[in-house]
Amino acid sequence: MQSQKAVDKTGFLDGWRGLAALEVVLTHLGRLALTDPQQRHSYYLGNAWSHAWLSLASIPLRFGPASVWFFFVLSGFVIHLRYARCLAQDLATPFGWFHFFWRRFRRLYPPLVTALVVTWILCAGAEHLRLPVFDWNLMRWDTTLSPIQLNLTTFLGNLLFLMTCYVPTFGTDAALWSLNREWWFYMLYPALIPLLKGRRTPWLASAGVGILFILSYLCHSYVLSLFRNIFHDMLLWWFGALLAEVYVGRIPATMRQLAPLALLLPIAVVLSIFGPARLAQLSTIGEIIFGLGFVGLIAAGFFVQDTYGWSPAANLKWLGEMSYTLYVIHMPILTFAYAELQHQLGADDTTVRIAAAPLLLVLVLLVAYFLHLAVERPFLASSRKVPALRKR
């Protein structure tokens, strides 16, 4: 029988998920702090030579999109890991679609509904107080509030995970775009199970995901926009699922062999800053390079843990546990706080806005933590049993 220590070998991934969520928060915080409310431009992208030092200092705050790609890879790994272990042991276990759906529903909806309500309250308050609101689509401060969608149709569309396809994200909570992908990844995943059963390798299912990825470039119409988003980004999610296949031994590879893929990450970072394609800006090439790099990073984490007995970021498990709530709640809070700061203090000076950033970061973390305890944790499973890593 595996020891409890062996059973918990994937626990460090919680800390990594928390760090990725924190990077997303810092990215948005940097955008708000470094966008001039009056001049309508941002020092964040380095378009003001007199403030070049701000552009250089903001480089670590530019990789929120890449952190979301990490979520996709990690999600594919975690979701598929449970069933991949059954496949590896030749267990004739039915998939249990209803149970799978209920777990995903219970995991995603309580924080999402809370975030939508908080967003509505803060956006309505900003409109009542006539505060400027940051338009995340145009990346500037806006006093008209015209792009802020708070109607019932948008609310229901976000509840059905149709945002960015048929309705915009609700209010100022533009971070919800990734939930559109995640939810439909989950809904599409059971359709791949028949392609995995009774086979020692997942290549048939992988071919199916690859075909869907190619088809995403043919879905140009508005009606097919949901399929375009899902099929395109599910490739990264499936990278994580394939890593789970390696984890349980169904793919003849080791974590040590995959770990060098992590070297793609510094290459992708350099290209995203200096390269003409701007890989950090949601380009297909950038997604794939970052996605493969994250596969290598996770594999390297397992290799280091097994070789040296050190679990990187294991002490940040608390941050990982609240990461989902932090992700869905931070944008409306930060946007309202900076709008109020500007209104009350006339904080047009970049120094004042930067100085306020650490306090607002602490505020968001505290709010997210207490909301996690109140609306997320009660719905989570009381225990999470994680399959053991096969010794190599």
Image: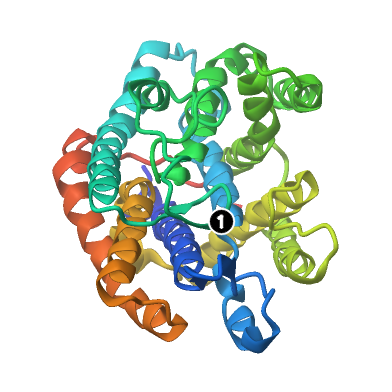
Give the quadrant of residue 367.
bottom left
The amino acid type of the residue labelled 1 equals Met
Percent position of residue 254, x then y? 68, 51
Q: Residue at x 60, y 41 (%)?
A: 240
Q: List the residue tagged with mark 1.
A: 139
Task: Count the marks.
Answer: 1
Q: Residue at x 29, y 46 (%)?
A: 127
Describe the element under mark 1 as helix, strand or loop.
Answer: loop
Q: Residue at x 65, y 88 (%)?
A: 50
Most foreground residue, 149 or 86: 149
Q: Is residue 343 left or right of residue 387?
A: left
Q: Is residue 150 left or right of residue 19?
A: left
Most foreground residue, 120 or 143: 143
Q: Residues within 10 Å of mark 1 (few under 14, many from 20)?
A: some
Percent position of residue 78, x then y? 48, 39
Q: Is residue 391 visible?
A: no
Q: Residue at x 44, y 51 (%)?
A: 10
Most foreground residue, 331 or 66: 331
In the rendered image of this protein, does residue 256 appear above or below residue 144? below
Give the quadrant of residue 22.
bottom left
Q: Is residue 380 left or right of residue 310?
A: left
Q: Is residue 335 visible?
A: yes
Percent position of residue 41, x then y? 59, 67
Is the image coloured rainbow, by chain, by secondary structure, or in one colour? rainbow
Percent position of residue 24, x then y? 48, 58
In the rendered image of this protein, does residue 16 appear above or below residue 36? above
